[in-house]
Image (spheres, rainbow, N blue to C red):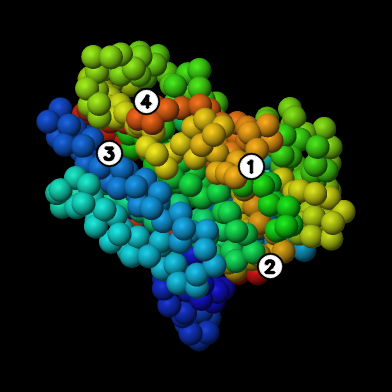
Amino acid sequence: MNARILLLLVLLTGNCVGQDLNQTHKLSDEILSIFGSAQIYLFRSQTLINSKAKNKDQLFGKAFIDQLKLIHQQIYHSPFPAADHPIKAYLLNSMIAVMDDNKALILDKEIDFKGFIPAVFAFQLSQRFSNGGYPVSIKFVGLKDRLVNELNVPDQWETSTLTKMQGSHWRTNEGFREVTASKQGKYLRTLQPIYHKQQCLTCHGSIADNPVNKGKAENTWSTENKAGFTMQNFKLNELAGGVSLSVGIDIQPTVSNSN
Amino acid sequence: MAAACFLFLGLCLPAAFSSVQAATANDKTSLTIGVFDYPPLVTITDSGIGGSAIEDLSAILDEAGYVATFRAIPRKRLLQSLIAHNVDLAFPLYDNNAEGITTMLAEPVLFETPGLCFRKENFVQFLSTVKHWRNLTTVYPGGVEPVPILKKYNKQLLPIYGEDVLDRTIKIVISGRADAAYVANIFSVYNLNSQYYRHVACSSFFGYTSPIYIGASKGLANGTLERLRQTKGRINLYSSD
């Protein structure tokens, strides 16, 4: 009983989250940097996550957010965004909730490879965050013809943006942002590219990059990575896909509208 | 009841105060909540309706000044019952956009994450790799609708029926009579407080997470919804086994 974990802090904010374009730009940047910090932190924490260490407190609750603040400072050279907006507060709460949901797995000493990788965190977070009743969604998208998970399929806007990013004239790391319109209203959409770093290639690179093949004769090499997926033959710094964010401009939360 | 008090208010009310509450409960308006069997949050047996969500909902309504009356309704009829205002509230509700209803709280109260539970030595980390589970004998609580990918690829999918169906389903896997158990929400089975934690580990199906709401009828009297929304109540996903 004393270890009961609360799934959801009910945020009865009642706040208006509608905002103008400038505010939406700022909010989008902040959401992406928070999300990016979490991805990097979880990538760096894989050894801890898969270890039998007793103390994994830094992966949960406020300590987790504190770690993200450190990463944010290192990567973005700016202070961590304040939780001064309902959407940012909901994002942070959602992150803590996803880590809590997976606490049993992360602390399970009988399982060596947990499989709690940044992509799994991102997926659970995006589901939770995007279903929170706010006019915002965030997700990973892959290249259409090289998807591991078919649910990461890009939509038309994302496909067209990724195609531009694959072009030789696209500046590395440069995101793309524009206002789009739909039946629900106007959205500021951002796609931030992700490139394969050296450590990504152990699962997404060539068969030769697969650590399970290390020291083995080439004719015995496995095409399957640690996670059970086929190696995808990506090269170092090749475009992997992107983080796709969509934030409503002057759109109220759906639930408040219906109320 | 003490557990529910702890859960919602962060403190346990003394037993004496509980009896005062019971005396004043007669003056409170009753709200009917439609529920279906959704273990371990809602369990419907011959002896009545129970489960941690029942305690939580009772406490939310109590805090708002209402008395909760629960009515078991088949899953497929719950939404219609809410639209027709045969019930005031409904839980669990998957669809928050249907005509004629709203939700009690703005945000989902929990996220249902379906997946498979295995004995720990057989744990499969990523269910996107169909070949790792397509040939496994997989049991699931009858009445739960397995995700489409499981129904499509697993040819040995067996429903389990009867009382305490979730418990029996998991125990079939623990005993080795099946390889895997499909559950509607892995986090209610695989958490640190679960009695199954020592024996099983669960993985989720990517992409099938569903937000779950407490539905509210638009026919509710003026002010009722606002009073409910002002409570600090929470639905706790994890039961203390």
Q: Is residue B31 visible?
A: yes
Q: Are marks 4 and 3 on the same chain?
A: yes
Residue B212 at x, y percent in the picture? 52, 44
Marks 1/4 in contact by CB < 8 Å: the verdict is no
For mark 2, what is the residue?
Answer: B198
Q: CA distance from mark 1 to mark 4?
A: 29 Å
Q: Nearer the viewer, mark 1 or mark 3?
A: 1
Residue named by callout 1: A216
Q: Do circles 1 and 4 both sit on a common chain?
A: yes
- Mark 3 chain: A
Image height check: is A122 above or below B120? above
Within 10 Å of disc 3 (Cα), the crowding (few <14, some 14-19, many 20+) is some
SS at circle 4:
strand
Question: Measuring 64% from the left and 64% from the top, which residue is drawn there?
Answer: A110
Q: Can you identify the residue that label 3 sits on?
A: A32
Amino acid type at circle 2 is Arg
Which residue is outermost to the left?
A: A22
Marks 4 and 3 in Cβ contact (< 8 Å): no
Please name which of the two marks, 1 or 2, marks the residue nearer to the observer. Answer: 1
Q: Nearer the viewer, mark 4 or mark 3?
A: 4
Residue at image coords 41%, 73% = B10
Q: Position of residue A219 (x, y in %)?
A: 68, 31
**Residue type highlighted by circle 4:** Leu
Check the picture and name the quadrant holding the N terminus of chain B. Answer: bottom right
Marks 1 and 3, how far apart at CA: 41 Å
Q: Is residue A140 above or below residue A2?
A: above
- Label 4 Cα crowd, 10 Å radius (few <14 / some 14-19 / many 20+): many
Note whether A95 is above or below B52 in the view shown: above
Label 4 belongs to which residue?
A239
Q: Tell me the distance, in whole angstroms, between the alpha carbons under discs 4 and 2.
A: 42 Å
Mark 1 and 2 residues: CB-CB less than 8 Å, in contact? no
Specify whether A104 is left or right of A61.
right
